[in-house]
Image (cartoon, grey):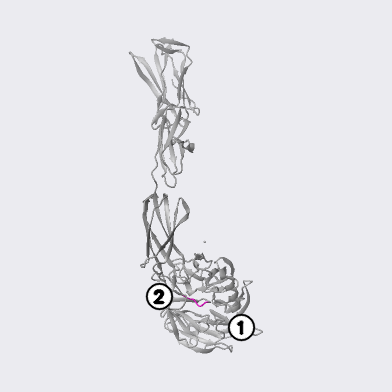
Amino acid sequence: MLFGGLFIVRKRALSAATSFAVLIGSAALVAGTAGPAAADSVVPLNVGTIGDMVVDGAHQRLYFSDTYNNRVVVTDFAGKFVKAITDLAYVRDLDLSDDSGTVYAALENADKLVAIDTVQLAVTAEYPTGQGTKPSTVASAAGRVWFGYGENWDSELGSVDLTTAVPTVSLALTTGADWSHPPTLRTDPAAPDTLVAADGTISSGPIVVYDTGTGVPVVRASAERQGFVKDIEIAPDGKSVVAADRVTSLSRLSLTDLSEQEKFPVSWSAEAVAVAPDGTVAGGTSDRDDVGDVFVFNGGSTTPASVRDTKSWMLFGGKMEWAPDSTRLFVPVQLPGQSEHVLRIYTSPKLHTVSVTVKAPATAPINKPLTVSGSVFSTLKLPAGAPLTVTRFDAENPAGKALGTRTLAANGTFSFPDTPAAAGKVSYRVAYMGDAKRAYSTGTAAVQVAPFPTYLKLDQNRRTVDYGTNVTYTASLGWSYRNRVVEIWADPYGSEPKRLLKRGTVNSAGKLSVTTRMTRDTWVTADFAGDTRSGRAHVGSTVYTRAGLTTTLSQHYKWSKIGTIWYQSYHQTGDVKVTAWNNPYPGRMTKYEVQVWYAGAWRTGSEDLVRLNSGGMAYILFDGAGAAGVRARVRTAYVDGVSGDNVNTTIHGAWKYFNITR
């Protein structure tokens, strides 16, 4: 018997004193154009809608009327949220007072105007305009707040006189026009006692210039513009207005008689206009041709515009404002196909954009010449011979190495040769450093440079050794540029983790050796990381390790020699105990085989697999009853792939001989 074993302003100009202070304070922002300008930015806005936007230069803040959410959202000039002023029922138009102390807001659904203190950021006064008036547009000047109110053809012009002890509201002040909708209103300190009103909801909507010196609006000039006037702004010269409409687009009109003085060429229907304190005109359009939708004219309509793209189908609501220093342009937009609103801040909008395109081969061998080429495009064409600076970045010069200056050809292209001496990713940066009219711009192209090949060899491949044998591995490294370090790793079969045997610098013969004790079949590798000119190298060597194995017989009563072979003798009344050991591994089994001497030859009697315990032991008992006179032999084995795993190489133990007597 056999037993198994155990187991994320509407008021466009500031007062003269405030403007001067801001400009002095921001002088560093406009000094010099040769170097790179601060980067444009795109900032998410915490608003559901944008009814209007006001720029407060004195306090460096932006105000957005979030109409549908009944609040005004305040941010800093970087678009960072400061505060939300709530409970402003359907707040629409906003305007900043001449002294920058108050933002006036029209609350259409509350029939009133409110004053928001720009220091406290809270409502400090309310001016009811009468039940059902629905004020929606607003502009302030010289102690009065002008507002447009009503609906459709019942729209009118009103005012709040703040110079009296008790503010006085006056309604139905319209003369010289029949509004189809509450008119857009504009005032500016540069044009005292002047109010401009425009109707942008019909194609023949009027523009009216009022004289407001007496407190009652008197028509100074009136004209009809054919084309839906969407936005209008008084220029800082106090003599003209710039109007954006969908037909004649962007035009400058005389404040005296509204005659057209110049037309600014833009690509499509104008939706918005902003005139900077220095007179620079920005026009926003519906971008339908991917040319861009913000056109900036720094010097008049005869000067080509610098163009920016807001990456949206149109300027949302026609809102666009300059910072008081005339260097930045704030453009809130709604992203196409999304509900999200973002603020685009253009830091150098007056400069023409420059686009540098660089081309280079995708791959190249080290130390071989290659050609880098490309082109430069600007909305204001660069002249032939314009300088371009070239910098190469590679493994030996990660901070960049200047390759000198190249010049632009008459057709706007450039080309130059180079021979890369370092392997890996090599990048070429070509830069136009900018000038008084054009922005700094760069372009890059990368080449994957192949290194010199590296010779690396590891010995001992396909050798088979016994369990516990010490094996010395030697890696041989050929020429390399600088790095002479090699790593030798062992990755035994099975669950044992990969481990570093040795890391070191090869000797003068290029050799690195390490000795390790073998207990399993093992994939040994040599690795060279390469350097700036020599390629990486990886080689491997598999050494097979036979399983550890012992087999012993016990409980015999004597040794007997039969022929030339010594047998362990057992009485038929006892048991033959076989003790087998293999180096342990989860689920491992040992295989035993018993043969009997019969008819002059050894014949297989039985064989089976017996599970090993956690120590790698198995105990097998053979019952000797009735087997007197039997001569037999037994051996155990580990068989790769049969004994429950494949982490060692097959080994058969020596035969152990025994006989049964009475």
Callout 1: 10 Å neighbours few (<14), some, many (20+)? some
Which residue is labeled 1 in the image? 143
Q: What's the magenta region?
A: 278-282
Q: How far from the left and from the top, in percent, is residue 584?
A: 48, 29
Q: Quadrant of the C terminus?
A: top left
Q: How far from the left and from the top, in percent, is residue 605?
A: 37, 19
Does the residue at mark 2 contact the one at mark 1 (Cβ under 8 Å)? Answer: no
At x 41%, y 11%, the residue is: 628
Q: Secondary structure at mark 1?
A: loop
Mark found first going from the N terminus, 2 or 1? 1
- Say if the magenta span includes residue 397: no
Which residue is labeled 2 in the image? 268
Q: Secondary structure at mark 2?
A: loop
Name the amino acid, label 1: Gly
Query: Is residue 155 shown to the viewer in this render?
Result: no
Residue 97 shows which numbered tag? none
